[in-house]
Image (tube, rainbow, N blue to C red):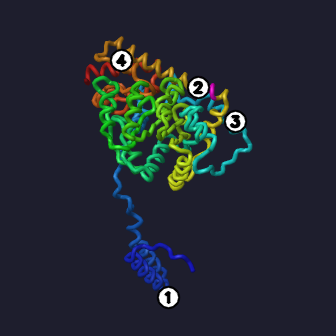
Amino acid sequence: MHPQLPSFDAAHSSAIDRRINSLLKHLDPSSSSQSAAAAMDSLSASPTSSFQSNSVFSHVDQAPEDPILGVTVAYNKDPSPVKLNLGVGAYRTEEGKPLILNVVRKAEQILVNDSTRVKEYIPIVGIADFNKLSAKLIFGSDSPAIQESRVTTVQCLSGTGSLRVGAEFLARHYAQRTIYVPVPTWGNHLKIFALGGLAVKTYRYYDPSTRGLHFQGLLEDLGSAEMGSVVLLHACAHNPTGVDPTLEQWEQIRQLIRSKGLLPFFDSAYQGFASGSLDADAQPVRIFVADGGECLVAQSYAKNMGLYGERVGALSIVCKKADVASRVESQLKLVIRPMYSSPPIHGASIVATILKDSEMYHEWTIELKAMADRIISMRQELHEALLAKGTPGDWSHIIKQIGMFTFTGLNKDQVAFMTKEFHIYMTSDGRISMAGLSSRTVPHLADAIDAAVKLAG
């Protein structure tokens, strides 16, 4: 027997049958060719014609552009020769060009020349070497969690995918389905966790009056959080503010979180990109792992290896015992399998090739520090340019903040003014990507900020 095929609704089906019967009568040999043609015209005007001409998605509204990616869309449409894109979180050279690290090119060449490589599916959890080396990178090779097999690591689709897999795992297997995120935070965090099945609440983080950390508010809000809740923490180079706690403050945060039985979930998107040191930028994560407690860590290699489009990331979950970690991994497979089945090969192979070779690893750290140092120098140049112009206000936060982004303190109207009059593009909250600046463009940005504060303030 043939399987039953899906049909149109009854009204459409009946109408089609009537038209076909009518056509068959007209196609009787005694009928004229003119009648047959008329019948064909009649069939073409059948009830299906309205079905074909009107989309079932006609009701769908035009969605607004993503507030971050939309900046680039607007920038691309601007014909001005002096336009400047400071919205996208991607590193640029002094010439304003995308950068592919030399060590990445070497790794790719090694992979290309390896005739044993194939394009078969890899395991659901990804490439074993990549996972092992990613865990060592963030936790340290001497981490007790690794030595005791208390950590499970799975390859995911960059930081975004790692966060989403973690969110869905927590929604299925963690009793407290509430996550507290800092204000502000990366805009995509709210959507990732909400669509992953978690209830999103907030805690104070940034103090607009000081353009620094609202440490007291942070402690108060986490201190009153529901017992057992998940807490999102930016491992380093907080996005969008560039404001990080000191190590002493991190220790206080750790003690509070552990005393409340909260579960830390780190987003590590910029390891090595903040200070130029991979180990220094991982310290906040490591002090939480050293106490024997549990946590989640989402890693991304988009920034620190420049592998933006390769979508390379990892999710690690540190557990109390090895057997728990093993069971957790089995459940992570059940989250990943219906989502994207298994991750891609190429980007993770690049990372594994670099991390497992001591010379390539060393070369990577040098290139990474050069990127971090250039961003730091852009902060200094912008700060000096604003001081030289006598721009009203205190701009010391530009050199106090760290990482790819600076939270300038400019308001929405000032940002709009800078876009209209100076063709400078950034998110409306005043966040700028320091990696998008160069010595050539710093004066243009300083002129724009100066004018915005004086004329649009």
Q: Secondary structure at mark 3?
A: helix
Name the residue nearer the viewer: 356 or 309: 356
Label 2 – label 4 distance at C-alpha: 29 Å
| SS category of the residue bearing label 1 | loop
Disc 3 marks a residue whose amino acid type is: Ile
Mark toward the start of the polypeptide (2 vs 4): 2
Q: Which residue is mark 3?
A: 110
Residue of label 1: 30
How far, Cα to Cα, is label 4 from label 3? 45 Å
Residue at image mark 4: 396
Q: Quadrant of residue 73?
A: top left
Residue 105 relative to residue 59: left or right: right
Residue position marked by numbered label 2 in the rendering: 365
Labels 4 and 3: the sequence-earlier one: 3
Q: Nearer the viewer, mark 2 or mark 1?
A: 2
Callout 3: 10 Å neighbours few (<14), some, many (20+)? Answer: few
Q: Position of residue 311 (x, y in %)?
A: 53, 41
* Element at label 2: helix
Q: CA distance from mark 3 to mark 2?
A: 19 Å
C-alpha span from label 1 to label 3:
76 Å
